[in-house]
Image (cartoon, rainbow, N blue to C red):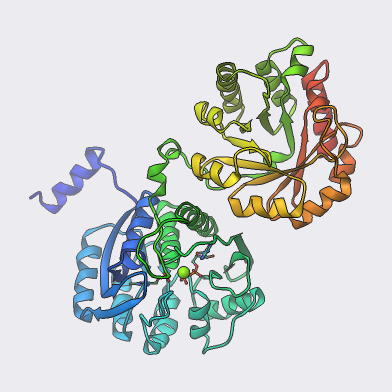
Amino acid sequence: MLEESAYAAVTQGSGLRRLAHVLTVAGSDSGGGAGIQADIKACAAACVYCSSVITSVTAQNTIGVQGVYSLAENFVAEQLRSVLSDMQVDVIKTGMLPSPGMITVLCQSIKEFPVRAIVVDPVMVSTSGDVLSGPSTLSGFCKELLPLADIVTPNLKEASALLGGISLDTVDDMRFAAKSIHDFGARNVLVKGGDLPGSSDAIDVFFDGEQFHELCGPRIMTRNTHGTGCTLASYIAAELAKGTPMLQSVQAAKSFVKSALLYSKDLMIGNGPQGPFDHLFMLKNQLNNYAPKWTFNANSLLLYAVTDSRMNKKWARSITEAVKASIEGGATIIQLREKEAETSAFVKTAVDCMAICRSYNVPLLINDRIDVALACDADGVHIGQSDMPAELARKILGPGKIIGVSCKTPAQAMKAWTDGADYIGCGGVFPTNTKQSNPTIGLKGLETVCLASKLPVVAIGGIGAGNIQSVMELGVQNLKGVAVVSALFDQESVATETRRLKSLLTVR
Ligand SMILES: Nc1ncnc2c1ncn2[C@@H]1O[C@H](COP(=O)(O)OP(=O)(O)O)[C@@H](O)[C@H]1O
Ligand SMILES: Cc1ncc(COP(=O)(O)O)c(N)n1
Ligand SMILES: [Mg+2]
């Protein structure tokens, strides 16, 4: 063994590297869906090292909790000392803490070995309704642990218990709870709404002491939600350990849980009502393992250029020339729409356009063809109602790609949201030569869909210099831009026309 000082020198001089490190202090779930097991998998999915101090061992499966065997407090203290005295822990995440003494032991260790952040998931009752940490721990949570917490993540039942049993039935109630729990001393509070009655979305309320943020995602219809709370808190801890700011960490965690649930929707592990989900779905999506893009920037929809090979042929320019000119004129996203091209030619064009778009940092989407998008590693796809269903496209492409769906009606917009799309294209707004048999929905129809859509919207269909402002003047908050074909590409100078439209969009 090297002596301590020699070891320090080796680590400094040899280029050895360290991994961001989360310590989870939680209970074991024999079924592997929640607790320590979920925490380790969530950290692994976030590429963060996870050490574990076990507080309690549960006999648990998809039916419920059959037994709980809590460890002696002094042995929990010994585990804490082993890890914290030796390893450089960035963030401590807590789960099941079955007794007041366990909370005291933990708080003492935190004071003795300070870390960068503390994430407290105040686990009290399992999703199956079994008690994991009784009312005797409430005072310890409120008085000892929450004042040390950088964030606390109660679900509705836990928030209610922390506040003396008040009823929490609405998002307004959740805001009230977040504010009240903040008063116990936690720096940030996330009240999770996975169990909010009658809500078609999964809405969480985040409060940082000054501002509220409602984090809203589609509610995935699945039995496999066992361990969502543990996973969310661990993923937040992992992001914090990597140095991600608090709100962004929470958003990344929420997005991760949504993707994991979507992927695991139809998994069947165990026969009970509460199934686990697959944290490591990314491994099955090898192609998308690199540089996952968890959040799509809706502002890139502002001036959305859709190519058309017939028009480019007519004006004797290649698709790559047209794409380059439109980007130089100010297009903010490109969609390659090659309805007639042979696959080999389409792939070649797509690869060339990808190189151009990457060099300008403008996203490139492929119309309809998931295979071509994969082949050229495009940023995503745009699909119509009769193309590959968005839910399947998401399964194939993984969480890192952008998916847009054409929608004419509020029902289609709602389906796009639950299927995991990132934006919708809405139209045709005005009549157009590009799609002659396509019925138009007018500005009124566009407004109706925007108001019903939870996703950002880009308007399409017959939009050009003469009417672009009437579209944006609708002033609906989620209408983020316009998609144009002829107004850019059926023109002598693509760059000039793009610049003209861009100036009309930005002078508002
Ligand atoms: N069916 C679902 N679809 C999408 N997100 C969900 C679903 N159920 C829970 N979530 C999300 O998972 C996280 C954990 O929430 P929740 O299930 O309320 O906590 P807990 O597991 O502690 O009861 C939250 O971000 C919540 O919005
Ligand atoms: C050991 C242990 N810890 C925590 C939970 C909470 O599970 P959920 O994340 O579904 O609320 C659990 N069921 N078992
Ligand atoms: Mg849950």
Residue 357's place in the image compared with 292, above or below, is above
Is any part of residue 398 visible from this angle?
no
Question: Relative to 212, is 277 on the left or the right?
Answer: left
Residue 215's place in the image compared with 329, above or below, is below
Q: Position of residue 401 (x, y in %)?
A: 54, 40
Q: Residue farthest to the left?
A: 1
Q: Residue farthest to the top?
A: 316
Q: Residue 90's image quarter?
A: bottom left
Counting the numbered discs, the total is 0
Q: Nearer the viewer, residue 502 or 229?
A: 229
Q: Residue at x 40, y 76 (%)?
A: 126
Q: Nearer the viewer, residue 49 or 306?
A: 306
Q: Residue 204's image quarter?
A: bottom right
Question: Relative to 342, is 81 on the left or the right?
Answer: left
Q: Position of residue 254 (x, y in %)?
A: 52, 58
Q: Residue 53's image quarter?
A: bottom left
Residue 21's place in the image compared with 127, above or below, is above
Query: Which quarter shows the C terminus?
Result: top right
Q: Position of residue 418 (x, y in %)?
A: 61, 55
Question: Relative to 466, is 288 on the left or the right?
Answer: left
